[in-house]
């Protein structure tokens, strides 16, 4: 389980989309279960994105955007995991095929 100190360190990395699968997963779980870190994330998000938007002069809904960002991160995490799983299955299939070919070569 990730500590608040760890999560706090990962907030800037999360906002830059710079976390690997494991860290991202632990981070999202921690944010879900820890109001303090969620608040810290919200503040850093506001500072980072809010300043940007003020410079652009756009209107924005930052609370909505942060929720979207968190949801999107979960989705991407799932997709990346599926990808790892798929390549794992493919590797097994290729290995199985190689064994079958070898067996056939011996039998024939
Ligand atoms: Zn925390």
Image (cartoon, rainbow, N blue to C red):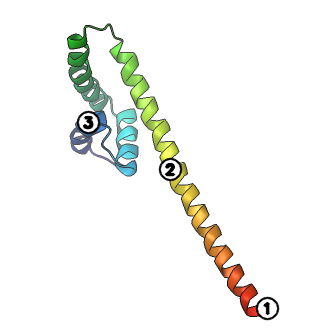
**Where is ligand 1, by quadrant?**
top left
Residue at the spot 38% in from the left edge and 38% down from the top edge: 28
Marked residue nearer the N-terminal end (1 or 2): 2
Find disc 2 in the rendering and name its residue: 81
Q: Is residue 74 left or right of residue 87?
A: left
- 37 or 85: which is nearer to us? 85
Find disc 1 in the rendering and name its residue: 108
Label 1 CB-ligand 1 distance < 8 A: no
Toward the right, the furthest residue is 108
Instruction: Say which quadrant the C terminus sits in.
Output: bottom right
- 40 or 47: which is nearer to us? 47
Observer-side mark, 3 or 2, equals 2
Q: Is residue 68 left or right of residue 2?
A: right
- State the SS at label 1: loop
Q: Position of residue 78 (x, y in %)?
A: 51, 43
Q: Gap between marks 3 and 2, in whole Å?
A: 21 Å
- State the SS at label 3: helix
Residue at the spot 25% in from the left edge and 7% down from the top edge: 57
Q: Quadrant of residue 12?
A: top left
Residue at the spot 65% in from the left edge and 68% down from the top edge: 93
Q: Can you say whether 96 is above or below 71 in the image?
A: below
Q: Gap between marks 3 and 1, in whole Å?
A: 61 Å
Is mark 1 in CB contact (under 8 Å) with mark 2?
no
Q: Gap between marks 1 and 2, in whole Å?
A: 40 Å
Marked residue nearer the N-terminal end (3 or 1): 3
For the residue carrying disc 2, how many other residues have a C-alpha within 10 Å: few (<14), some (14-19), or many (20+)? few
Find disc 3 in the rendering and name its residue: 11
- 74 or 17: which is nearer to us? 17
Q: Quadrant of residue 101?
A: bottom right
């Amino acid at each position: 389980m990730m500590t608040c100190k760890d999560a706090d360190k990962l907030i800037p990395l999360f906002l830059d989309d710079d976390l690997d699968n494991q860290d991202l997963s632990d981070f999202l779980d921690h944010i879900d279960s820890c109001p303090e870190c969620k608040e810290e994330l919200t503040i850093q998000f506001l500072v980072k994105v809010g300043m940007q938007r003020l410079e652009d002069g756009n209107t924005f809904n930052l609370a909505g955007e942060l929720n979207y960002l968190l949801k999107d991160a979960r989705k991407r995490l799932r997709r990346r995991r599926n990808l790892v799983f798929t390549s794992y299955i493919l590797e097994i299939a290729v290995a199985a095929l190689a064994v079958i070919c070898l067996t056939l070569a011996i039998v024939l």
